Amino acid sequence: MNELPKLILASGSPRRSEILISVGWEFTKHVADIDESERVGESPEDYVVRLAREKAEAVAVHYPGGIVLGADTTVVIDGQIIGKPVDLDDAVRMLGMLAGNWHEVLTGVAVVQNGETRSDLQRTRVKFAPMTDQEVAFLAKRGDPLDKAGAYAVQAQAALFIEGIEGDYWNVVGLPISLVYQLLK
């Protein structure tokens, strides 16, 4: 391997950009505009993989011959998808559900190259310590939760309350970079 191939990232996530930059991956950004509604009866796993594929395929039409990367991350607790909070009260509600419990972070990843789409799923388990109402409020207020699945960023204030991670840490940040590399190999 001489070089990592240049990518088109079909995502506006600053965390995905930071991860690609940190491993030295060259990319340009083209944010996909797709309907992210859940479908009736769709599992969380199918949901994130479908959105990753739809994002990558929507952007790929603009870059024939390019390599387009799409990803979608969600948090799941007790089989329920927890998306991004709509406001601070919603963030407090979500963080209250996560406090003292294990949850899963699922990321669907899709790569489109020469009209072919390859996709896969990364699953990581995360355990939050029990938290007081004050700690939940602190994290909601200080953790900039509104653009984050599950209302937290593992690499920021939430790190104070995370007791354990089983699986790919980078997946929890927002992009399982080793899975991206495997899909491109």
Image (cartoon, rainbow, N blue to C red):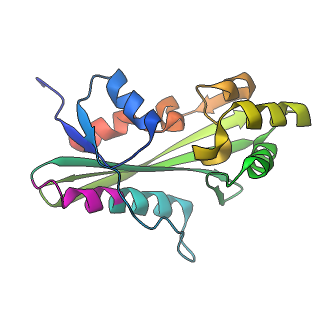
Residue 87: in magenta span:
no
The reply, left or right, for residue 167 in relation to residue 126 is left
Examine the image and state in which quarter residue 137 appears.
top right
- Residue 132 visible somewhere in the drawing: no
Count of picture labels: 0
Looking at the image, which is closer to me, 170 or 31? Answer: 31
Determine the residue positioned at 27% across, 22% down. Answer: 24
Determine the residue positioned at 26% across, 54% down. Answer: 118
Magenta span: helix, strand or loop, mainly? Answer: helix
Q: x, y (%) of residue 45?
A: 50, 59
Task: From this view, report whether residue 33 is shown above or below residue 22.
Answer: below
The reply, left or right, for residue 78 in relation to residue 111 is right
Determine the residue positioned at 24% across, 49% down. Answer: 68
The reply, left or right, for residue 5 in relation to residue 176 is left
Residue 58: in magenta span:
yes
Quadrant housing the N terminus:
top left
Which range of residues does the magenta coloring cover?
A: 55-64
Q: x, y (%) of residue 88?
A: 75, 46
- Residue 29 visible somewhere in the drawing: yes
Q: x, y (%) of residue 166?
A: 59, 33
Determine the residue positioned at 49% across, 33% down. Answer: 168
Quadrant housing the C terminus:
top left
Looking at the image, which is closer to me, 87 or 160? Answer: 87
Examine the image and state in which quarter residue 183 appears.
top left
Q: x, y (%) of residue 163?
A: 72, 26
Examine the image and state in which quarter residue 130 appears.
top right
The reply, left or right, for residue 51 in relation to residue 4 is right
